[in-house]
Amino acid sequence: MSSQAASRRQAAAGIVRALRTAGHEAYFVGGCVRDRIRGVEPGDYDVATSARPEEVTGLFERTVPVGEAFGVVLVVVGGQPYEVATYRTEGPYADGRRPERVEFADARADVMRRDFTVNGLLMDPETGEVIDRIGGRADIAARLVRTIGDPDERFAEDHLRMLRAVRFAASLGYEIEPATMEAIRRRAGAIRRMSAERIREELAKMLTRGGARRGMELLAETGLLGHVLPEAVPMAGCAQPPEFHPEGDVWEHTLGMLDLMPANQDARLAWAVVLHDIGKPQVRSIDADGKVHFYGHVAAGERAAGDVMRRLRFSRAEIETVLALVHNHMRFMHVTGMRQAKLKRFIRMPDFDLHLELHRLDCAASHGKLDNYEFVKGKLAELGEEDLRPPRLVTGHDLIEMGFAPGPLFAEILRAVEDAQLDGALSTTDEARKMVIARWGGERQASQGDAAAESPGGP
C-alpha cells in the first residue's frame, strides 16, 4: 500500500472513530469495501452512518453540505474530501431520475436501497468485519454485477443504473447477471429520459476507468448503444480494406484501439478514439475494381462527432480539442514528406501528445506499422522549443515602418517569413526584410497609394 493510500484509509477510519465516539453507528460502505475484498487498494472511501447531517457537520472542523436533503456531507481531512452519508431510504422515483422523498433509516434499509450487490457491503475499519445482507461477497467471488432486489424495479427507480451496470462490469472485468442483463435490454430505451450531462459523465467513466472495450461491447449487447451513441451503431459491419485493416470492420478497429488504450487516460483522447472513424459508414464506396474507399470520412466524422458532443453537452473547449483530433488523425500519413515548416507547425499544435497517441493507437490496432509514429517521436526529441517557436524576425510594427499599410497582407507576409525561418532559409532580421521587399515591394507601393487616396488630403 502506498503512503498516500494508507493516509487516506487512516483519515477515513478516523472519521468512523469520531462518529462512533459520539455515539453513532458508522462503517465503510460501497466501492471501497468491494475493492478491499478484491485485494485492490481503494481510491476513495465512503462512510455510512446513523448520524444526521447536522450531527456530522457539528463533529468535524471542515465539512461541505453537498446534499444535506439526501443526508450527504463531505468531511474534509488533510485537504481530501470523504463522503459521509446518513442511513436512508428513498422513493418513489416518479421520473426515473431522483427520489421524491428521502427518509432517514437504519443500516439494513440503507443497504437495500443501493444499486448493486457488490456495492452494498459494510465494513468495520477497526476489525475488518464485513456485513453482507445482500449476497455481495458471493457475487464478488462469482464476478457478477447483480441488482439488489428486482432489477426492473431498480432500473425503473433510476434509469442511469443501466449504464452503471455496464461500467462496473467493464471496469471490474465482471459479467452482468442474466436477469439484470435482460432487464437492461427490456428497458434500454428509458435511458433517453436521463439528462445529457449524466449520460456523458457515465460514458466518460466507462471509457477512462479501465475495460473501455468491454464497456462498448456491453453497450451494444444491451441495446443501450443505439440510444446513447446511435452514430456508432453503423460502424459494425462497415467492412474495410484488409490490406490496411486486417483486424476487420470499423467497429472492430475502434474496439481494438480502446483495448490498447491505458486506463485513466485523458477523456478527450478516449472520445477521439470512439469518434475518429465515425464518419466512415456515411461515405463508404466501392469502385469498379471492387476496392473499398472512404473518401471524405474525416469531414463526415467531424460533423458526426460534433453532433454527438453537442448533444451530450460537452464544453466548447472539449469539443474543439476532440474535433481537432478527428480532423488531424490522417495527417500523420504524410509526415515524412512534409517540408520542415509544415512539420514544425504540425507538431507544435496544442495537445499534440494526444494527437500522437491517437495515431499510435490507430496504427497499432490496424496494420501495426509505427514508422511515422517513430519518425515524429524522433523529431520531438531532436527539436527544441526555439526550433518550433523561434522569435519573430519581422513583426507587424516592422512592416508599418517598411511602408506597408495594415491589412490582410500582414498575415500573409508574417506567415511566409515564419515558414522560411522554420525551413531554415532565413535566420536574421536583415534576411527577412530583404525577402519581404523582394516579394512584396510592389504591393507596398500600391498600399501606400491606396492610403494616400483615402486620406483627407489625398486627390
Image: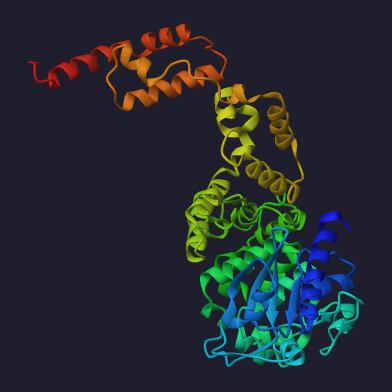
Q: Is residue 215 above or below residue 146?
A: above
Q: Is residue 342 above or below residue 395?
A: below
Give the x, y percent position of residue 293: 58, 50
In front: 139, or 347?
139
Residue 310 image point, x, y percent: 47, 61
Image quarter of the C terminus: top left
Q: Residue at x 71, y 74 (%)?
A: 166
Which residue is drawn at the image coordinates 81% and 82% (left, top)?
121
Q: Position of residue 3 (x, y in %)?
A: 85, 55
Is 370 placed above or below 192 here?
above
Please tell me whether residue 340 is drawn above or below residue 268 in the rendered image. above
Q: Is residue 288 visible?
A: yes
Q: Nearer the viewer, residue 370 or 313?
A: 313
The foreground one among 76 and 311 is: 76
Question: Is any part of residue 174 visible from this angle?
Answer: no
Q: How many marks?
A: 0
Which quadrant would residue 58 be assigned to in this image? Answer: bottom right
Tell me how the rendering is colored: rainbow
Residue shown at 77%/91% (left/top)? Answer: 108
The residue depicted at 76 percent of the width and 54 percent of the height is 262
Looking at the picture, tell me which residue is in the foreground, 106 or 202: 106
Side (left or right) of 71 relative to 440: right
The quarter of the picture where residue 347 lies is: top right
With 395 as the anchor, is 254 left or right in this view?
A: right
